[in-house]
Image: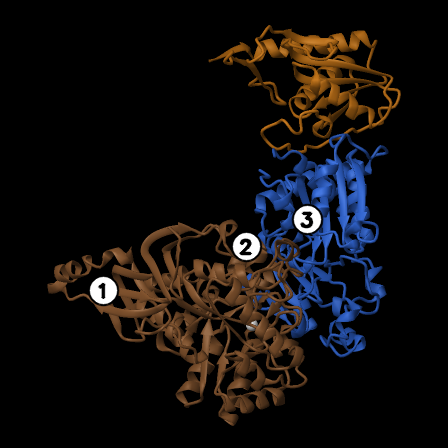
């Protein structure tokens, strides 16, 4: 059974709000860059960057980070890992890096992403922005910017559909068997 | 996608599996360009390099690939292991099992030894060259190198020059190139052509000039110098005269043809130095790509459910 | 004690017998063989009942009753390689496979090139063997291709043929002399046909499969060149040539041609040469490593054709048992050979099922024909012959399980095959082995 829990407007509003919060918390975007986690975080990072650029009227660096090599579930996953592109366009040394992902769940992906990021340099700060926080953390990780908190049960799944234009966005909750 | 726990040869792989390895390899190639060239996925795993034939280059490549993936590496080689004292291959395999290794990378002068080990062990076996059978990671790195220059394999004319009979590289390359749709030409004296090889869907030339015409890729194989004493050809001079890759001959290939060699080279026997070091040579690139490909293979096999 | 085998289908090509009937065995000899006439069936049975007490009666209904099989080419490994096989275990395996006579090759250690070894084998076989053993003597001393062994002494002591099997006689002049000299005794010279230059380093048939396995091939020419040479020498000398383990189409043709020219040549093949092709080696299973190597489909067909038209006279096993350590290893260094005694007849029956040869032909190639070639009084159910009998159920199937072989050699490429034709009982010189 699946249920649409956010529509196009909800998502656009959430992204705009997060963009404002990022600018506000960091007092501008100097020394800031966004890094989306493959695969769901990359488009979200681009969407956030356009909003931020609209607010601040200048360009912000956006990158993509593949965390496949840093996952802790290589042996336990059913399907084979597919390696995706990592593209960090600037040095991250002494920068504030905002990691961006679509859904925050157990926290393991974020742990892997931080490990991966640190192999590229030494950021001054790492912050985290997610569209959906669905709970069930297994690691001491929390998000700095959240689009929407959605309580779920562990076996549910959340599917986020967003594209670069922001025309057909939606978030769907699929109830799992418990 | 990748079903076998082992990489025994290209023969056993589907085109999809080959592309899957190559795609992963490009991810690792990016890793190798970073300042920190090490990633953690094989942390806590142990790779045993079991080399019954001396091959510093391949062993170092596998060793470095494993270390870049944060695995521990043990090197066994014929001179240091007890094999010389009459221990059988089976004993050696069981010893490796008892050590709790996760991978064994095997190089042996006898074809089929990796298959033998794979039946005996439930850990991943990677063939690093078995007799005249296969050297799959070499073929994968060759594919990767060609792809990086030509962007495709299908339809390319790839000429392989040299001792085909005794070459595991040639066999793995033939399987790899033909599976992905290239047109493979073998250029060699008839004494160094394996039986009924035409059934593999390749063309055979005993004239190098004919075989090189309009080739996109020119690969020369290492000539084992002892072949001469076995009567496969009368002298090295005559071999070079007939089959050596020279600048004049290379001009018969396409202008943008790339020159490859699995190394180590016999300069002046199978290839002129000017060509080996020339602008069309991608021989050093092959070495770098070998590392990325071997990382991909280790990484993907680690993900196979056993 | 008397043994009466009744209700079985007696097939004895040596006497042209094929029908339901009875065999009476007494003192290790065939006393009487009687075909039952359909109309008198009840009477025959009644007539016997009064004497039944003094008989051991074997009911062979549903089975064929044939002369005990004769293997003219086996390696029993003793003396010298007792860890691979002994005369005791090899003859037990033979009996298990329906064989009651085994001729053993001389490549033991020491080589059977002198009467001490021949005597040893014969005595050992009498003491410990489960069936009759005839030694084959070496052609050259130590099988070294340098000088002829003392063929007369060997013959006198009990050798029934000469061979350097395991190796060819590379020196054509010595082969000529062997063929000439052996005419004195009218015994065959058995040739292992292999040009060692062409086969050097080879471990399987040369062809497409060897190419894709990266294994060194042995070309068919290596066998055919020697077969052609020996046929020429046979024609030259008028000696008796027997060509061992024919595996290739070319060899079959050479032999057929020689026979049509009246040359005194006979030939054998082995079950693996009509049951397997080189494609089976894809798994690098060393149990398939055998010399000469298993060839291609075309050769298999030619071998079958040769058995059918008589170009090939005999099915022998070339039973070559090996210790597991000689086989569980790299293909290149694994030993050549197949442990064949316990599967040979069932594999032969596959030819009958395929229609390649008929049952009578199969039995001939494994009984009377090899006996005649070797000049031994075996392979027949004739009255007064040795009581060597095999009772075989043609319909029963079994799964080949080398771990249950009575041979020490578990090296069978037929592991796991389901075959028809179970050996129910073997009677060797009157001694009954019941396998049911
Ligand atoms: Zn032989």
Distance, label 3 to label 1, CA atoms, is: 54 Å
- Would residue B214 be seen by someone viewing this image from the given angle? yes
Residue B198 lies, with reference to residue A61, above or below; the image says below
Residue B57 lies, with reference to residue C225, above or below; the image says above
Check residue C168 in the rendering and tell me which mark sits there, or answer none: none
Check residue C21 in the rendering and tell me which mark sits there, or answer none: 1
* Crowding near the residue tagged with mark 2, few <14, some 14–19, many ≥20 C-alpha atoms within 10 Å: many
The image quarter containing residue C120 is: bottom right
| Label 3 close to label 1 by CB (< 8 Å) | no
Chain identity of mark 2: C
Share a chain, discs 3 and 2? no
Q: Residue at x 73, y 41 (%)?
A: B96
Q: On the image, numbered disc 2 is attached to which residue?
A: C410
Give the image location of residue B140, x and y in percent: 68, 49
Q: Residue at x 65, y 25 (%)?
A: A39
Tell me: C93 left or right of B249: left
Give the chain ID for the blue colour: B
Give the chain ID for the brown colour: C
Picture quadrant of ligand 1? bottom right
Give the image location of residue C135, x and y in percent: 53, 74
* Crowding near the residue tagged with mark 3, few <14, some 14–19, many ≥20 C-alpha atoms within 10 Å: some
> Counting residues from the N terminus, which is met first, the one under dot 2 or under dot 1?
1
In what quadrant of the picture does the C terminus of chain B appear? top right
Q: Residue at x 77, y 35 (%)?
A: B69
Distance, label 2 to label 1, CA atoms, is: 37 Å
Task: Report which colour depicts chain A.
Answer: orange
3 vs 2, front mark: 2
Looking at the image, which is closer to me, C373 or C131?
C131
The image quarter containing residue B97 is: top right
Check residue B90 in the rendering and tell me which mark sits there, or answer none: 3
Indicate how the structure is coloured in the image: by chain
Distance, label 3 to label 2, CA atoms, is: 17 Å
């Amino acid at each position: 059974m699946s249920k649409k829990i956010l529509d196009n407007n909800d998502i656009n509003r959430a992204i705009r709000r997060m963009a404002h919060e990022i600018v506000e918390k960091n007092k501008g975007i100097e020394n800031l860059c966004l890094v989306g986690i493959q695969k769901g975080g990359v488009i979200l990072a681009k969407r956030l960057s356009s909003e931020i650029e609209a607010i601040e009227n200048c360009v912000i660096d956006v990158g993509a980070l593949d965390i496949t090599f840093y996952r802790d579930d290589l042996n336990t996953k059913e399907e084979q890992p597919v390696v995706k592109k990592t593209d960090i366009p600037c040095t991250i040394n002494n920068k504030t890096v905002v990691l961006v992902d679509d859904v925050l769940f157990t926290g393991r992906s974020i742990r892997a992403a931080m490990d991966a990021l640190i192999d590229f340099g030494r950021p001054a700060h790492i912050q985290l922005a997610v569209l959906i926080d669905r709970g069930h953390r297994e690691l001491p990780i929390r998000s700095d910017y959240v689009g929407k908190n959605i309580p779920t049960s562990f076996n549910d799944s959340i599917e986020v559909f967003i594209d670069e234009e922001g025309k057909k966005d939606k978030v769907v909750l699929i109830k799992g068997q418990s | 996608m990748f079903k076998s726990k082992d990489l025994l040869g290209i023969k056993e792989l589907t085109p999809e599996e080959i592309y899957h390895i190559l795609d992963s390899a490009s991810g690792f190639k990016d890793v190798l360009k970073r300042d920190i060239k090490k990633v953690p996925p094989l942390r806590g795993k142990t790779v045993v390099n079991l080399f019954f034939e001396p091959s510093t280059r391949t062993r170092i490549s596998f060793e470095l690939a494993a270390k870049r993936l944060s695995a521990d590496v043990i090197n066994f080689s014929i001179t240091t292991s007890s094999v010389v004292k009459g221990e059988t291959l089976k004993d050696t395999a069981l010893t490796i099992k008892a050590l709790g290794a996760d991978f064994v990378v095997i190089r042996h002068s006898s074809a089929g030894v990796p298959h033998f080990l794979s039946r005996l062990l439930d850990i991943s076996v990677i063939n690093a060259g078995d007799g005249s059978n296969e050297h799959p990671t070499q073929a994968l790195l060759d594919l990767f190198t060609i792809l990086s220059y030509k962007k495709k394999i299908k339809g390319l004319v790839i000429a392989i020059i040299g001792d085909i009979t005794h070459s595991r590289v040639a066999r793995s390359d033939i399987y790899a190139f033909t599976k992905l749709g290239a047109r493979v030409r073998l250029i060699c004296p008839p004494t160094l052509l394996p039986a009924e090889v035409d059934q593999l869907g390749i063309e055979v030339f005993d004239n190098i000039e004919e075989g090189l015409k309009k080739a996109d890729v020119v690969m020369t194989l290492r000539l084992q110098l002892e072949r001469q004493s076995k009567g496969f050809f009368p002298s090295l001079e005559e071999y070079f005269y007939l089959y050596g890759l020279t600048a004049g001959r290379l001009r018969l290939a396409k202008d943008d043809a790339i020159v490859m060699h699995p190394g180590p080279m016999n300069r002046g026997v199978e290839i002129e130095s000017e060509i080996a070091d020339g602008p069309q040579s991608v021989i050093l690139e092959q070495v770098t790509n070998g590392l990325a490909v071997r990382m991909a293979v280790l990484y993907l096999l680690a993900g196979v459910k056993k | 004690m008397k043994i009466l085998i009744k209700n079985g289908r007696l097939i004895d090509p040596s006497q042209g017998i094929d029908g339901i009937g009875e065999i009476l065995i007494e003192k290790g000899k065939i006393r009487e063989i009687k075909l039952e006439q359909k109309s008198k069936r009840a009477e025959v049975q009644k007539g016997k009942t009064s004497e039944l007490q003094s008989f051991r009666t074997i009911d062979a209904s549903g089975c064929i009753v044939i002369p005990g099989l004769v293997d003219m080419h086996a390696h029993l490994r003793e003396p010298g390689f007792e860890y691979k096989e002994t005369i005791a275990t090899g003859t037990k395996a033979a009996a298990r496979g329906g064989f009651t006579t085994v001729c053993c090759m001389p490549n033991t250690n020491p080589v059977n090139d002198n009467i001490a070894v021949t005597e040893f084998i014969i005595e050992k076989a009498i003491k410990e063997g489960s069936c009759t053993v005839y030694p084959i003597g070496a052609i050259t001393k130590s099988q070294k291709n340098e000088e002829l062994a003392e063929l007369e002494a060997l013959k006198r002591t009990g050798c029934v043929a000469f061979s350097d099997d395991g190796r060819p006689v590379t020196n054509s002049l010595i082969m000529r002399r062997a063929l000439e000299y052996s005419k004195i005794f009218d015994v065959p010279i058995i040739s292992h046909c292999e040009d060692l230059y062409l086969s050097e380093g080879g471990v399987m048939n040369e062809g497409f499969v060897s190419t894709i396995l990266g294994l060194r091939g042995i070309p068919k020419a290596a066998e055919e060149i020697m077969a052609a040479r020996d046929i020429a020498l046979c024609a030259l000398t008028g000696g008796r040539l027997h060509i061992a383990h024919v595996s290739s189409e070319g060899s079959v043709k050479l032999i057929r041609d020689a026979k049509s020219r009246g040359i005194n040549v006979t030939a054998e093949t082995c079950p693996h040469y009509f049951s397997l092709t080189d494609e089976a080696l894809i798994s690098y299973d060393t149990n398939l490593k055998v010399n000469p190597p298993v060839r291609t489909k075309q050769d298999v067909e030619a071998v079958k054709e040769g058995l059918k038209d008589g170009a090939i006279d005999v099915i022998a096993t070339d039973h070559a048992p090996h210790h597991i350590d000689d086989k569980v290893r790299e293909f290149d260094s694994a030993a050549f050979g197949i442990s064949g005694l316990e599967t040979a007849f069932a594999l032969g029956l596959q030819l009958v099922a395929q229609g390649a040869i008929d049952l009578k032909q199969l039995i001939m190639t494994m009984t009377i024909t090899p006996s005649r070639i070797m000049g031994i009084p075996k392979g027949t159910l004739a009255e007064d012959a040795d009581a060597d009998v095999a009772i075989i159920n043609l319909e029963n199937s079994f799964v080949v399980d080398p771990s249950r072989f009575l041979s020490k050699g578990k090296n069978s490429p037929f592991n796991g095959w389901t075959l028809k034709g179970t050996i129910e009982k073997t009677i060797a010189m009157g001694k009954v082995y019941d396998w049911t």
